[in-house]
Image (cartoon, rainbow, N blue to C red):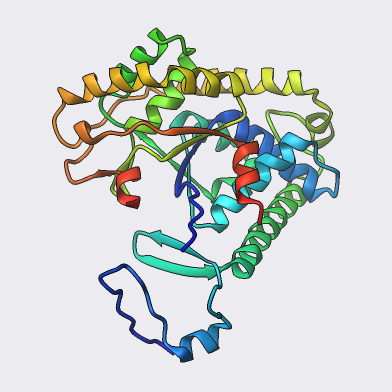
Amino acid sequence: MVRTVVIRETGELVLPRETLEESHMVAGTELVVMARAGQTLLLDRVQVRRRLEDIGQQMREGLRISLARVGRDAVFAGLSLGAYLALSEEEEIALWDRLFKEAEQELNIREHDIPPDFVPARQKRR
Amino acid sequence: MSTTSLPTSCRLDKNVVREALRGLVRATLGMPLPPRQGTSLGVVHALIAHGGLLYITPELWHLLERPANLPIASPFLSYLRVLRPGRYLKRWGRRLTEEGFSHEDAMILSYASFGFDALEKTFGVESVLTNDLRMQDRYVHGFPRIEARFARMIRQLKAPYQQATLPDVVNAEELWAQIAL
């Protein structure tokens, strides 16, 4: 059910009783406000936790599919999965530093004008 | 009313991405995660779950999207966005190297002020997420000087650059403690 609510001058948002019942929210429920371009979401902690688990699950599932597709072939920087996992932290850092330097050299980064109507992300949040 | 403030826009440094990716591989294979990998991956998941926008630089995107790296990077890439280089990025980066930051750290911080997102019509980010405690320490302790220098630089610029902001620099562990769902 879509309902309209009005924000009071004090900034308070009063949700109709029906909305509270449908969403199982009670007085004192802590809500996470997600304001983004195009939509604003109010989620309680349980919903956020569920989203978090879903995101983890989706990433793992995506990786599982991706790894199954490559089989025994290389998975990162020419390394097999076993060789990638066997890298020590120092070796991994050195590998990423090398890859990053190569990427920097390959890309010719050019600055662009930022349109005058753009606002700082920090300011947009306020 | 109680509020917990998490960044809604975060620029990830390459070490956070590296640790999170390795953590994702281990988690997918059912292997235990070393603390930093677990924290980096957990923070990335939590920020996405909270609706945060996670940014990387074009260089890091280029690295991850190489065919040789895609088998592992592809599930991660769809949750990331690229900060494009805006004007004055390099100038502010040079100023930061004069404050003692390495070239790479200076560019991390400069993208957080002068990188832009055409989709959101924003530039800069609220926070830089790093595992580099030395860089964070240098930034926090040097902040009064850095802030004064930044203010002097942007004062002379036209809109929208004169509205540019400096980011907070947070490490994954402290953000993880703050999220503590």
Where residue A50 sits: x, y (%)?
65, 66
Residue drawn at the location 45% of the way across and 34% of the way down: B168
Pick the front one: B14 or B131: B131
Residue drawn at the location 71% of the way across and 28% of the way down: A78
Where residue A71 sits: x, y (%)?
80, 45
Is residue A74 shown to the viewer in this render?
no
Query: Is residue A81 depicted above or below B179 in this figure?
Result: above
Query: Is residue B123 depicted above or below B162 in this figure?
Result: below
Residue drawn at the location 80% of the way across and 23% of the way down: A88
Where residue A70 sits: x, y (%)?
74, 45
- Residue B30 shown left or right of residue A30 in the figure: right
Residue drawn at the location 55% of the way across and 38% of the way down: B65
Where residue B10 sits: x, y (%)?
47, 41
Is residue B15 shown to the viewer in this render?
yes
- Residue A87 shown left or right of residue A32 in the figure: right
Res A38 → quadrant: bottom left
User: How many numbered marks does the figure carry?
Assistant: 0
